[in-house]
Amino acid sequence: MSLPPVKVLFDENRIAARNKELASEIAGAGFENLLVVAVLKGSFVFAADLLRAMHASGMAPEMEFVHLSSYRDAQVSSGQVTILRDVESDVRGRDVLLVDDILESGRTLAFAKDLLMARGARTVKVCVLLEKPGKRAVQIDADYVGFMTPDVFVVGYGMDVAHAFRQLPFIGHIEQLD
């Protein structure tokens, strides 16, 4: 199978530097009993690097995962969020940092944030690697944003198109999909 070319938007060094900055911001927020909840699948690389940067900033959060989907194999959100794998930890009374790859329509993150708050989290803050302004379908803002990105289809650094390109060490876009 021949894959289309990918144009680099954010390279490895820029991503690593921004992860350190984000971790420093998060470390300064005064969270208590912090639980980091990564939204799978797209955020897994970002969440792992951010967690290591948080450790280097003196933090020791616990880590959990939730697998939500509004895309499945499509390139456009269906608008319906489905829980494919739920958080196992009790979030009651805890500070939670919800980590996702991209804030676009906001449906998935709003769903996850509302779910964790309804389960009794003390606070739920949102950290995203990328934000696409102007694409919001629901009202939600990220507390921590890695990069603002143009309105292009992004891949790499854990993000995919039909399960391809997750392995790329940078964030790029495929012009053929714009």
Image (cartoon, rainbow, N blue to C red):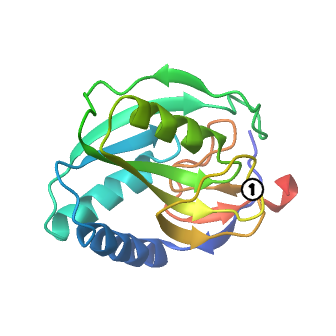
90 above or below 32? above
> Which SS class for mark 1?
loop
**Residue 116 percent coordinates (x, y):** 41, 35
Question: In this figure, which residue is indicated by the disc labeled 1?
Answer: 153
Residue sitting at x 42%, y 75%: 18
Viewer-proximal residue, 38 or 126? 126
**Residue 14 percent coordinates (x, y):** 47, 78
**Residue 56 percent coordinates (x, y):** 18, 69
Q: Is residue 70 left or right of residue 74?
A: left
**Residue 37 percent coordinates (x, y):** 36, 42
43 above or below 153? above
Residue sitting at x 33%, y 73%: 25
Residue sitting at x 13%, y 67%: 58
Viewer-proximal residue, 118 or 83? 118
Question: Total number of numbered labels?
Answer: 1
148 above or below 1? below
Q: Is residue 156 left or right of residue 118?
A: right
User: Where is the C terminus found, in terms of image quarters?
Assistant: bottom right
Q: Amino acid under label 1? A: Phe
Viewer-proximal residue, 91 or 85? 91
164 above or below 84? below
User: Where is the N terminus found, in terms of image quarters?
Assistant: top right
